[in-house]
Image (cartoon, coloured by chain):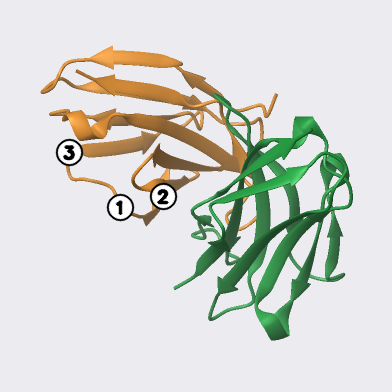
Amino acid sequence: AQSVTQLGSHVSVSEGALVLLRCNYSSSVPPYLFWYVQYPNQGLQLLLKYTTGATLVKGINGFEAEFKKSETSFHLTKPSAHMSDAAEYFCAVSGSGTASKLTFGTGTRLQVTL
Amino acid sequence: DSGVTQTPKHLITATGQRVTLRCSPRSGDLSVYWYQQSLDQGLQFLIQYYNGEERAKGNILERFSAQQFPDLHSELNLSSLELGDSALYFCASSVVGGLEAFFGQGTRLTVV
């Protein structure tokens, strides 16, 4: 079975500060890892993904994440927060194959203050 | 715009009723997933179809059922509705399983 744990249901940062959202995964097979963002009353939008290859993954809106197998982590970072980054962020894991589904973490709500 | 279309956007219905939620996947995507999002349960996987066949089942109640049609659109049927079924229901699609899924805007179901 696969699972992800997101540490911190709420994170608050000042505009211009570093954003760090934490995600740890558990998987018995090589995982595919994803970060999604959900703005109020919207669907989920893919920020970035890790499947194979380079462990530092760059996504949209200046976000990036690093796959660390030794730490079973896939933390999301952004050097400088913008007000528009305020949203809920979900980490997700899946395996490969046609019967693989995304298993989501509980989400982290990011608040950006002036 | 993800390319995944869900209808209706909002649905209000009474307890005991039956509703059907519809999803049109992105062009070319064979895999369709249904998720339920609620405050207490978070994002829960319900069911997956791949090219018309059921491929994986999650925490889907027996009162709920789904199907994927030859044109690859999918429907989620919810029956004998209870207050606790009130939630956002998302459909997502992907080319094959395991790769990134693209989500629709969701159907907000309110059971009164």
> Is disc 1 in the same subunit as disc 2?
yes
**Residue at position x 34%, y 45% from top?**
B40
Residue A25: x, y in percent? 58, 71
Q: Tell me the kind of residue under disc 3.
A: Arg
**Residue at position x 28%, y 47% from top?**
B60
Image mark for residue A92: none
Residue B85: x, y in percent? 25, 33
- The chain painted green is A
Q: Tell me the kind of residue under disc 1.
A: Asn
**Residue at position x 53%, y 65% from top?**
A5
Residue A30 placement, left or right of B65? right
Quarter of the image with the N terminus of chain B is: top right
Image mark for residue B63: 3
**Residue at position x 53%, y 55% from top?**
A102
Under circle 1, the secondary element is loop
Which residue has dot 1 on it? B59
As drawn, which residue projects farthest toward the front? Answer: A114
